[in-house]
């Protein structure tokens, strides 16, 4: 009967806040009934338990006399589960099994619902209501129920109803929350400022109030309706039970399967190192009853590996020898010094996460296999809930209350600084409003902005999880509702964990599709690449020369910047920079320290042989979580259970009180291991300081391997690599970067060829010279359907092809006809050079180089433009793009009238070319401040 924020637009209310209100009102039962949603069930259950309330589970669903009408009449019924949650889940599936409108039931479906109490909405069509075949139907009396409905019930015949019930109709929780409701749910026709809005709106009745009605009903009607409500709540005994894990139907001996896999992997289990590791892992896995889970994952991955490219590993599962021997991963954890305990934490009983990357173009087959193998009724995609983050909460308030967006954007930039550290990520709007200059000024100018503090964290919308799949032993609707429109559960991954639902993450990675196509074009097997020697000089030479385009992970500026400052000579270098090219290490100085040591410009300190050995791969810099774990375990002599607590605490930047007992244990153990106490303190303090930035080495190794494979294929099969990468690149700018890179390596291309173009980029011979050939779909105006039609006529002579095909191919114009569009356009406009531009024009790539200094002239298109108020007046922010890159450019107040106004007046974002002269600011963030400008011309598009 009670709505929460999980009604997604029909109500607002944090679950804890709503339950506190119910407790204050003296209710013993807490009936949740969100609109078309059961997403709140798990949190509701936990909240009720903490407050001594009895949870009752329901759902509110629209009921219509014609659910397929263009504008159906809708009354919102509430259904309360009597003794089985499955009854509600079946109704949700039934209501969502149509796509015309929001989820709806017909009156017949609603009245025939089994295992539930059926409570009408505020305005039902009495003529459509029939006596239910089973269950109980009750007329609802709410604050919004029309008097005519009540009079009809009191005076007329009512054989279809068992009784009537007084119930709430809340859209928000507390009196005064109407502004919150209207802001989040967008229930106004125009934006208003807060004072006017509050004055106009008055006090709404739709809060969760002690008095649930405003009608002047007869006393007996009210008293009986409330008694009925309590009676049905007392009678509702449905429980939200934990699921029984899926039990595979085929025999499986984990030890024997590992031994069998060791033969294929050429692993000598007679070796003490491997044998001991296997025994330790098997003891943990079997002791926690995880064998069935490993069997299922092994089955899915084994099926997939025989049909498509599967990633080497993802996340901490890369650290498991069992996963490696079963073929779930393809990286030897002992060879790369990975830690099993990072994968399975002895402190926790929940299933470990084994995330798997599959070829993006074939991932759908994996979902189909799981459904066919384990049963459609036992498999569903996982749901997910997006909440209002700081930026979106501030934005919606700014829109609703006419606050300038640039003011709230400035505060959001402080709150969400792109992950400097854990404490920054935890910053709330309230903290920012109180603890920052920008926040205090914003709150002083617009006091109503504080409503955003209530919105942050509220549910915003739900969708299907990108990768998660749920498997259950019993039919899945025994435990959770499934939205028929998407096939996704109405629970997120956290709820699934609490419900003991087995979750498998089936992720798609485009780069695996690239490698898959590349291998097919070269005739190589997937296994040949997995077994490629890790010391290929051609691959490292390619990276060392800065040929980064198309290389997995190397498209980011941060990683490229690190790679440009060192010589990449081994696989460990790729692993290290994968971990170090993140905001935390970059801003803390860890990355620069590593670079200096790599280049021999800074000494690697010696602390203790055991510590030095653990940190040797990263030149003495604490880079990985596994290093912290190994130091705590091997040097500090700590138990694995405590080691994992330390790792999690450091990742969350917990305070001194949390670490105190672990610090004492570590220092004591380190001294026993022969480390001087003062050095032990230095090591502990370093771990605490940098622990928040330490990365998962298992994941770093796994993704570094994909980067290495890309480098191998690009070094040895460059044309095939470019063709495969182009086929899986949708962004025009990225295609152009790839083609420029190929051009620099002496590889030419043809945008389209009538005889050779296929559905993908391929390789063709032109006068004996191999070139890249663009696809048929690359022609502007030709989509997949037309492309297939054209290719089907490929066998016919040109004169016999259809007029439609000839017309489609007539222009042959593509979005990559030129890979230097700005240079070519300027040359077309000014064959002899741009008048007035006498200084050498620098490319943006040159200017972005950290070693560049001076006052350059750049020439490019204004791709982005934003006018804003600066400290001393108007300023203009620009993003300027040439054929080599893009950079941030600023026009300050002093040049606003002479430069900015001209650029603004010409408009045409992305269409106007300018020559700009200015100064480049020193430092990691490269930007140019403009002092002179000249309009060159338009792009001709």
Image (cartoon, helix red, strand yellow):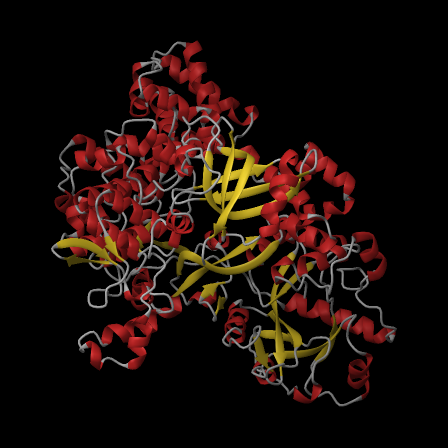
Q: Nearer the viewer, residue 644 or 794?
A: 794
Question: In the rendered image, which quarter contains the N terminus?
Answer: bottom right
Please provide percent x and percent y for residue 517: 23, 56
Q: Is residue 237 above or below residue 390?
A: below
Q: Nearer the viewer, residue 202 or 380?
A: 202
Q: Say which quadrant the C terminus sits in.
A: bottom left
In x, y percent, where is residue 939?
Answer: 45, 53
Toward the viewer: 770 or 304? 770
Side of 735 where 192 appears, left or right: right
- In the image, residue 93 above or below residue 367: below
Any part of residue 620 in sight: yes
Percent of width and height locating residue 231: 70, 69
Is residue 345 placed above or below 458 in the rendered structure?
above
Q: So how many labels did they put on this image?
A: 0
Determine the image quadrant of residue 219: bottom right
Q: Residue at x 69, y 78 (%)?
A: 138
Compared across the picture, whether 775 is left or right of 269 comes to right
Task: Please provide percent x and percent y for residue 373.
Answer: 29, 66
Residue 390 is at least partly visible in this image: no
């Amino acid at each position: 009967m009670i709505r929460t924020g999980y009604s997604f637009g029909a109500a607002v209310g944090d679950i804890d806040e709503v339950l506190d209100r119910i407790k204050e009102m003296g209710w013993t039962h807490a009936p949740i009934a969100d609109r078309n949603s059961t997403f709140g069930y798990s949190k509701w259950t936990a909240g009720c338990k903490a407050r001594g309330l009895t949870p009752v589970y329901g759902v509110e669903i629209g009921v219509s006399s014609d659910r397929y009408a263009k504008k159906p009449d809708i009354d919102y019924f509430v259904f309360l589960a009597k003794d089985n949650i499955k009854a509600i889940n079946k109704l949700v599936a039934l209501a969502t099994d149509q796509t015309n409108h929001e989820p709806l039931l017909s009156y017949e479906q609603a009245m025939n619902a089994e295992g539930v109490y059926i409570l009408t909405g505020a305005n039902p069509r009495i003529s459509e209501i029939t006596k239910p075949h089973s269950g109980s139907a009750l007329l609802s009396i709410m604050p919004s129920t029309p008097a005519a409905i009540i009079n009809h019930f009191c005076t007329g015949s009512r054989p279809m109803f068992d009784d009537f019930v007084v119930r709430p109709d809340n859209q928000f929780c507390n009196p005064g929350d109407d502004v919150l409701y209207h802001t989040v749910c967008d229930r106004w026709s125009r934006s208003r400022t807060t004072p006017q809005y509050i004055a106009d709106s008055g006090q709404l009745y739709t809060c969760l109030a002690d008095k649930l009605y405003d009608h002047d009903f007869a006393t007996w009607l009210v008293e009986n309706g409330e008694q009925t409500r309590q009676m049905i709540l007392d009678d509702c005994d449905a429980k939200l039970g934990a699921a029984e894990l899926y039990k595979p139907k085929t025999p499986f001996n984990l030890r024997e399967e590992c031994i069998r896999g060791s033969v294929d992997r050429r692993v000598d289990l007679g070796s003490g190192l491997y044998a001991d590791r296997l025994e330790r892992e098997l003891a943990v896995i079997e002791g926690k009853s995880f064998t069935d889970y490993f069997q299922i994952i092994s089955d899915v991955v084994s099926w997939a590996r025989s049909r498509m490219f599967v990633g080497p590993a993802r996340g901490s599962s890369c650290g498991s020898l069992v996963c490696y021997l079963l073929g779930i991963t393809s990286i030897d954890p002992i060879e790369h010094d990975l830690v099993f305990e990072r994968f399975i934490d002895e402190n926790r009983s929940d299933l470990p996460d084994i995330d798997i990357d599959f070829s993006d173009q074939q991932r759908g087959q994996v979902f189909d296999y799981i459904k066919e193998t384990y049963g459609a009724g036992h498999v569903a995609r996982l749901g997910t809930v997006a909440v209002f983050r700081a930026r979106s909460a501030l934005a919606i308030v700014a829109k609703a209350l006419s606050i300038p967006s640039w003011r709230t954007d400035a505060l959001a930039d402080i709150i969400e600084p792109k992950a400097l550290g854990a404490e920054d990520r935890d910053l709330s709007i309230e903290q920012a409003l109180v603890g920052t200059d920008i926040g205090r000024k914003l709150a002083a100018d617009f006091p109503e902005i504080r409503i955003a503090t209530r919105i942050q964290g509220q549910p915003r919308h739900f969708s299907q999880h990108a990768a998660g799949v749920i498997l259950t032993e019993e039919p899945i609707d025994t435990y959770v509702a499934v939205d028929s429109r998407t096939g996704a559960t109405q629970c997120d991954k956290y709820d699934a964990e609490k419900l003991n639902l087995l979750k498998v993450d089936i992720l798609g990675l485009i780069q695996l599709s690239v490698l898959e196509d590349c291998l097919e074009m070269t005739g190589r097997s997937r296994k040949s690449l997995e077994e490629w020697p890790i010391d290929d000089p051609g691959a490292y030479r390619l990276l060392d020369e800065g040929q980064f385009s198309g290389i997995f992970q190397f498209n980011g500026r941060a990683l490229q910047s690190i790679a440009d400052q060192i010589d990449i000579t081994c696989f460990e270098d790729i692993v290290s920079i994968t971990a170090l090219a993140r905001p935390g290490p970059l801003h803390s100085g860890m990355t620069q320290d590593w670079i200096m040591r790599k280049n021999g410009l800074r000494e690697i300190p010696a602390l203790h042989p055991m510590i030095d050995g653990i940190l040797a791969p990263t030149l003495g810099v604490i880079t990985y979580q596994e290093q912290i774990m190994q130091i705590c375990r091997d040097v500090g002599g700590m138990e694995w259970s405590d080691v994992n607590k330390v790792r999690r605490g450091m990742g969350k930047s917990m305070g001194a009180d949390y670490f105190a007992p672990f610090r004492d244990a570590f220092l004591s153990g380190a001294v026993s291991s022969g480390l001087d106490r003062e050095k032990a303190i230095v090591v502990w303090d370093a771990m605490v300081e940098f622990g928040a930035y330490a990365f998962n080495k298992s994941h770093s190794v796994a993704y570094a391997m994909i980067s290495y494979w890309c480098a191998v294929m690009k070094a040895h099969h460059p044309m095939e690599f470019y063709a495969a990468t182009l086929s899986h690149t949708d962004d025009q700018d990225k295609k152009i970067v790839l083609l420029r890179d190929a051009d620099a390596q002496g590889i030419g291309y043809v945008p389209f060829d009538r005889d050779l173009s296929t559905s993908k980029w391929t390789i063709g011979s032109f006068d004996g010279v191999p070139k890249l050939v663009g696809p048929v779909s690359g022609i502007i105006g030709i989509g997949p359907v037309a492309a297939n039609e054209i290719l089907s006529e490929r066998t016919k002579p040109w004169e016999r092809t259809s007029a439609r095909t000839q017309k489609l191919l007539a222009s042959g114009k593509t979005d990559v006809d030129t890979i230097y569009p700005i240079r070519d356009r300027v040359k077309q406009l000014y064959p002899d050079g741009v008048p007035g531009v006498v200084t050498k024009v620098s490319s943006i790539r040159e200017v972005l180089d950290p070693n560049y200094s001076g006052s350059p002239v750049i020439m490019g298109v204004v791709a982005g433009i934003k006018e804003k108020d600066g400290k001393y007046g108007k300023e203009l922010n620009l993003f300027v793009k040439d054929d080599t890159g893009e950079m941030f450019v600023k026009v300050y107040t002093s040049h606003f009238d002479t430069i900015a106004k001209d650029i603004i007046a010409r408009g045409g974002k992305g269409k106007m070319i300018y020559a700009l002269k200015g100064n480049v600011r020193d430092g990691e963030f490269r930007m140019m401040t403009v002092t002179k400008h000249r309009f060159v011309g338009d792009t001709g598009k």
